[in-house]
Image (cartoon, rainbow, N blue to C red):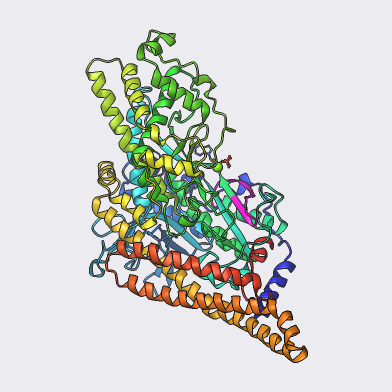
């Protein structure tokens, strides 16, 4: 059996950089080739229909179903010209992937032949037989209808032979069963609330966009080695494996030269991504060996989320063409960095950016401060919820490890911005007005011009860092759908901005001048949300203690963290903003708990199998060889000398016996613990049981397996080791 391992290692080493077919055109020429974007809409739609559709896309005008037939006809024409034969509604169910069911364009033509058909009805709405998507009990199977409905704000695209239409997915009774529906609602809510606040500064503002620029981290592993690791195959991470002697301690991988075979994969991926309209821009080696990153230019949030889902699928596919498997798991390897997905988030209006300083006028500076402070308030009030939005069984391995943000949400502001906030907090309105030049109405804070915020002022330990013109939410998991974090953040800010407006309006009604009123409320907020502001070392133990004193959510058990979604203030926030109802939140939490349990359950089973089918047999086989050797020594040498010569082997024999016994006992106990947990009715309690009993048992079993890896004959060991998985590229 060990032959397999050596064969795969050998083949992996032999693989050469694969050729990439680089298109003759420039990227700007093939960009969005497979996307039904505005340019194609203009070409393929009647001008009236085009104008109406653009109004829907740009201004959120209600979709007039009467144009659907003509849009469908145009889309079909384009898609067929591009060689598509099928279409699908593409949606994001509450799993971590996307879902699609392909239908061919063909229909009977009534004359014994076939024709290509695609109507407005099929474009706008479909009813996928989706009873087996997670729904948290919202749909009993007897009323298992679910509808997917076209999202015109994200353009249709072609993958292979299929026209993909981005859609939301809702239950017969109207509840969201996906990520996109609540995301669109949250974006709508923040748009509405932010526009009203913008009107204090600029009455011309019509729309506020939330932007997202994700940075996707991932690992690549040779496909042969991957296939020889049942844990990678089944769970996406290694459940056993001792550190390799060298891993990332020399920091020689980060930003290093990209290995040729990897570079070929990246080029190929980028070409395909660009054709799908994903504006990929940055690629580099990450900190851990075999870890890399890809980042596009930021986009409007809904589109960015779709593009991230799309790119994860694309990565999986293209990696295979290069003899790799891509690992998107947050922690595929113990002891080296895990992977995250930094979510760079900002707001902008139809007339300019919002989280950028200094502005051209004092009003712009005050507007900047207003949005920064309200963001901090939202993050402070909902810090537990934001943590819940990025929590998962898989991300739990990364957060709080010594390389990723801790499982506590706080915000890094940097020296300059901190000084500005301190200054505002300490100053009185009069002083501020005295600082200003014109009519006593304009705010002019001397520090603000300096605020051309220094990008070098970085703090990698912060989960929510201000980085010049945006906040970077770094706690998001590499495998997650960005929508989860974006729903919570944008909805929380929408609620916060609406309250800010109410407070300011109340003061204005009492006769305070507008700017004074805004400053008064901001000053109050700066004081309230202080606990969320932390510029220090987020990895330190002192911070954990300090955060608890500040009242920040410090819970580390993922199933318990999910409770944040059902806290009164979260439910109120989601209901007020119209993003999710109590019922939806309850249902989604059921899904989260169930998902958590299932992930751990699968891991525990795989680990049990590995222990029984790989580790114990191999260790015992090696042990038998040692025993054999001890007996033979006795035959060769006098008893005393034989005993002396066999002392080390006897130690090894004992160690193997002890460790294999421990492993066997604990695997049995773990199976029993699963049986107990599986009997628990409540999904929440069951997930907690898995967290409290199964996860620690797996750690203990692993510890002994990893120790065995160090002493058992390398020739016999069946599983590719970390040094092979991490360094063959
Ligand atoms: P880092 O130095 O943190 O790796 P990059 O320069 O690679 O940052 O950019 C990270 C991401 O942030 C990119 O996707 C980029 O487009 C995005 N980004 C830049 N400015 C903004 C902004 N104002 N709003 C949202 N995302 C942004
Ligand atoms: Mg970054």
Residue 469 can be seen in this image = yes
Q: Does residue 561 appear to the left or right of 543 in the view shown?
A: left
Question: Is residue 687 shown above or below 532?
Answer: below
Q: Is residue 414 left or right of residue 483?
A: right
Residue 654 coordinates in the image, percent (x, y): 60, 78
From this viewpoint, is residue 106 visible? no
Residue span colored magenta? 276-293
Q: Quadrant of residue 10?
A: bottom right
Q: Position of residue 366 (x, y in %)?
A: 41, 22
Question: Would you say residue 407 sits in the magenta stretch?
Answer: no
Which quarter holds ligand 1?
top right
Residue 270: % across, % down: 61, 52
Compared across the picture, whether 687 is left or right of 467 comes to: left
Farthest residue toward the bottom?
Answer: 635
Which residue is drawn at the image coordinates 71% and 61% (left, top)? 19
Where the N terminus falls, by quadrant?
bottom right
Say which quarter of the image contains residue 2.
bottom right
């Amino acid at each position: 059996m060990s032959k397999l391992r050596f064969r795969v290692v050998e083949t992996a080493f032999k693989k050469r950089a694969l050729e990439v077919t680089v298109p003759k055109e420039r990227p700007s020429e093939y960009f969005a080739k497979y996307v039904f974007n505005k340019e194609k809409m203009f070409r393929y739609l009647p001008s009236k229909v085009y104008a109406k559709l653009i109004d829907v896309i740009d201004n959120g005008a209600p979709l007039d179903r009467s144009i659907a037939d003509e849009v469908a006809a145009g889309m079909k024409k384009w898609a067929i010209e591009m060689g598509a034969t099928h279409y699908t509604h593409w949606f994001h169910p509450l799993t971590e992937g996307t879902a699609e069911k392909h239908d061919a364009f063909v229909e009977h033509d009534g004359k014994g032949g076939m024709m290509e058909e695609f109507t407005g009805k099929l474009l706008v709405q479909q009813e996928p037989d989706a009873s087996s998507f997670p729904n948290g009990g919202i749909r009993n199977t007897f009323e298992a209808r679910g509808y997917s409905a076209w999202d015109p704000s994200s353009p249709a695209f072609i993958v292979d032979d299929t026209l993909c239409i981005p859609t939301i997915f809702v239950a017969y009774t109207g509840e969201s069963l996906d990520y996109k529906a609540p995301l669109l609602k949250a974006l709508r809510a923040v748009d509405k609330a932010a526009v009203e606040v913008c009107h204090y500064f600029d009455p011309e503002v019509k729309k506020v966009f939330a932007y997202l620029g994700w940075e996707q981290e991932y690992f690549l592993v040779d496909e042969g080695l991957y296939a020889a690791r049942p844990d990678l195959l089944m769970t996406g991470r290694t459940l056993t494996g001792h550190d390799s002697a060298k891993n990332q301690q020399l920091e020689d991988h980060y930003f290093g030269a990209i290995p040729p075979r990897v570079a070929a994969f990246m080029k190929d991926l980028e070409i395909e991504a660009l054709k799908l309209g994903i504006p990929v821009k940055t690629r580099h080696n990450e900190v851990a060996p075999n870890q890399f990153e890809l980042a596009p230019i930021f986009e409007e949030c809904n589109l960015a989320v779709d593009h991230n889902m799309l790119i994860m699928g694309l990565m999986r596919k293209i990696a295979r063409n290069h003899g790799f498997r891509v690992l998107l798991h947050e922690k595929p390897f113990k002891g080296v960095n895990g992977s995250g997905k930094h979510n760079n988030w900002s707001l902008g209006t139809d007339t300019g950016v919002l989280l950028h300083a200094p502005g051209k006028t004092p009003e712009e500076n005050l507007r900047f401060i207003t949005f920064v402070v309200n963001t901090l308030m939202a993050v402070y009030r909902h810090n537990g919820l934001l943590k819940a939005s990025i929590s998962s069984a898989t991300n739990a391995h990364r957060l709080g490890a010594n390389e990723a943000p801790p499982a506590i949400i706080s915000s890094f502001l940097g020296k300059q911005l901190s000084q500005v906030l301190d200054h505002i907090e300490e100053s009185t309105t009069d002083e501020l007005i005295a600082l200003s030049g014109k009519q006593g109405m304009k705010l002019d804070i001397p520090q603000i011009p300096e605020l051309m915020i220094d990008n070098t002022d970085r703090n990698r330990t912060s989960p929510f860092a201000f980085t010049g013109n945006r906040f970077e939410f770094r706690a998001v998991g590499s495998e997650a759908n960005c929508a989860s974090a974006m729903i919570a953040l944008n909805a929380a800010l929408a609620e916060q901005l609406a309250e800010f407006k109410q407070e300011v309006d109340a003061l204005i009604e009492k006769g305070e001048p507008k700017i004074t009123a805004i400053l008064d409320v901001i000053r109050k907020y700066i004081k309230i949300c202080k606990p969320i502001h932390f510029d220090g070392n987020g990895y330190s133990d002192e911070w954990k203690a300090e955060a608890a004193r500040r009242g920040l959510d410090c819970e580390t058990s993922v199933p318990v963290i999910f409770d944040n979604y059902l806290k009164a203030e979260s439910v109120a926030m989601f209901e007020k903003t119209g993003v999710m109802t109590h019922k939806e939140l309850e249902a989604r939490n059921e899904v989260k708990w169930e998902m958590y349990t299932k992930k751990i359950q699968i891991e525990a089973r795989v680990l049990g199998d590995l222990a029984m089918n790989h580790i114990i047999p191999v260790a015992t086989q090696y042990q038998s060889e040692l025993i054999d050797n001890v007996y033979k020594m006795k035959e060769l040498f006098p008893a005393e000398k034989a005993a002396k010569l066999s002392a080390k082997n006897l130690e090894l024999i004992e160690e193997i016996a002890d460790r294999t016994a421990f492993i066997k006992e604990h695997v049995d106990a773990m199976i029993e613990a699963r049986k107990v947990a599986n009997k628990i009715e409540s999904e929440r309690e069951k997930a907690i049981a898995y967290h409290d009993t199964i996860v620690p048992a797996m750690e203990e079993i692993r510890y002994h397996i990893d120790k065995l890896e160090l002493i058992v004959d390398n020739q016999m060991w069946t599983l590719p080791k970390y040094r092979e998985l991490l360094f063959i590229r």
